[in-house]
Amino acid sequence: MKLQTQIPLKKANDPIDYDSRLVLLGSCFVENIGEKLHYYKFRSALNPFGILFHQKAIENVVARSLRGDVYVENEIFYHNERWHSFDAHSDLSSTSKEGLLLNLNQGIETLNEDLRNCTHVLITLGTAWAYRHLETDTLVGNCHKVPQKEFAKELVSIDEIVKSLESTCKAIQAHNAEVQFIFTVSPVRHLKDGFVENQVSKAHLVCALHELLGRDGTTTGKKAYFPSYELMIDELRDYRFYKTDMVHPNQLAIDYIWDKFKDVWISEKAFSCMEEVGVIQKGLRHRPFNPKSQQYIAFVKSLREKITKIRKQHPFIEFDLAAFDAIGMG
């Protein structure tokens, strides 16, 4: 008896392994994938400008970073006792303008370098709704709780999203011709926009990506689509897969979609290393009853031998040994 409709998936032609370098940009769901990649110690850079929900915001920071166009004081503003940029998430905001400019320009430098040297770019689109700042006539990445009267809300058209995505890809490919793009639509529902409005938004994103990637909706050249949104609404169509806000996928759903992503986009030759890294990560989180016991000392020795072995294979991998340091075993 089949209790699910399952989306057919096949292994990617250009999968990720421990030689890969990834850049992840977009909505909050890309952070879930980024956390998994970080846990398994893949080389990945995650949202240097913080969470960005729509393609126009992503296009802006990508283009600006590749130009090396640094931020200056007249581009930021003070609101609610903090300095902000309309281009970036509030995670970069600061109590001082110097602090914000430092954060923004470090983001420029980091993203510029990462995009020039990465093998894969994963972009997750969250919504087709955007806010236009009336004074500057620009679509913002984040409103920072500035009064709504200063913005006009608009639905970015399918054609505009396609053009924006093409512009982003071309800008990156001009510096990194062999990069592999992976696009996905976030399964997080934006119900503050309205139930119907959320569906219209997601439809715009899916249609735009379908247009970008070709009539079959899968791949064209070095661009591919991964169905995060479809997995959530078709294979996990139950509220038990949502957090208590009934909007965000819960950990079970995130793990499920990650497993599908792993099957499609992680090279099988990386699986054994992932398993070893997972054992080490669990070991580092272990808290002993008696840290001075012979049993635990032997456990630490074994774990350190595993770490040494992994780092001989992949010298860039670093583990957090703070727990061992705290008990004098680092």
Image: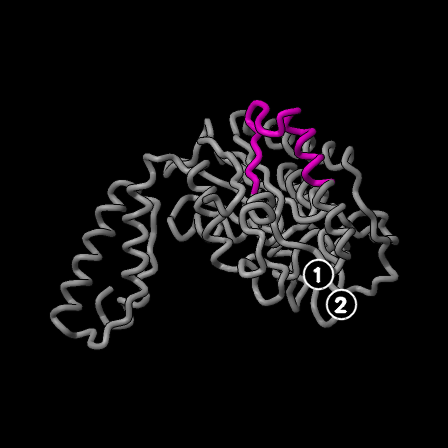
Q: What kind of colouring is applied to the model shown?
A: one colour
Kindly give the residue lying farthest to the left in the view shown. Answer: 294
- Mark 1 and mark 2: span between their CA atoms? 7 Å
Question: Disc 2 designates what residue?
Answer: 79
Q: Residues within 10 Å of mark 1 (few under 14, many from 20)?
A: many
Please name the amino acid that badge 2 sits on. His
Would residue 114 be found to the left or right of residue 157 on screen?
left
Kindly indicate the quadrant of the structure image that contains residue 100. Answer: bottom right
Q: Residue furthest front?
A: 1
Q: Which mark is residue 84?
A: 1
Who is closer to the viewer here, 185 or 307?
A: 185
**Which amino acid type is marked by label 1?**
His
Q: In terms of image quadrants, where is residue 168?
A: top right
User: Helix, strand or loop at disc 2?
Assistant: strand
Left or right of 12? Residue 156 is: right
Please report the residue visible at 58 percent of the width from the left and 67 percent of the height from the top: 244
Residue at horizontal 58 percent and vertical 29 percent from the top: 218
Q: Is residue 106 visible?
A: no
* Mark 2 nearby-residue class (10 Å; few <14, some 14–19, many ≥20): few
Q: Residue at x 35, y 45 (%)?
A: 316
Residue at the extreme bottom of the image, as rendered: 289
Provide residue 74's location: percent of width, then percent of height. Answer: 77, 55
Q: Visible in this render: residue 270?
A: yes
Q: Earlier in the sequence, mark 1 or mark 2?
A: 2
- Horizontal side of 301 relative to 266 (left or right) equals left
Indicate the position of residue 253 as horizontal and vertical percent values: 51, 54
Residue situated in front as seen by the camera: 62 or 26: 26
Q: Which residues are magenta?
A: 204-227
Where is residue 52 drawn, in percent x and y?
65, 50
Q: Quadrant of the C terminus?
A: bottom left
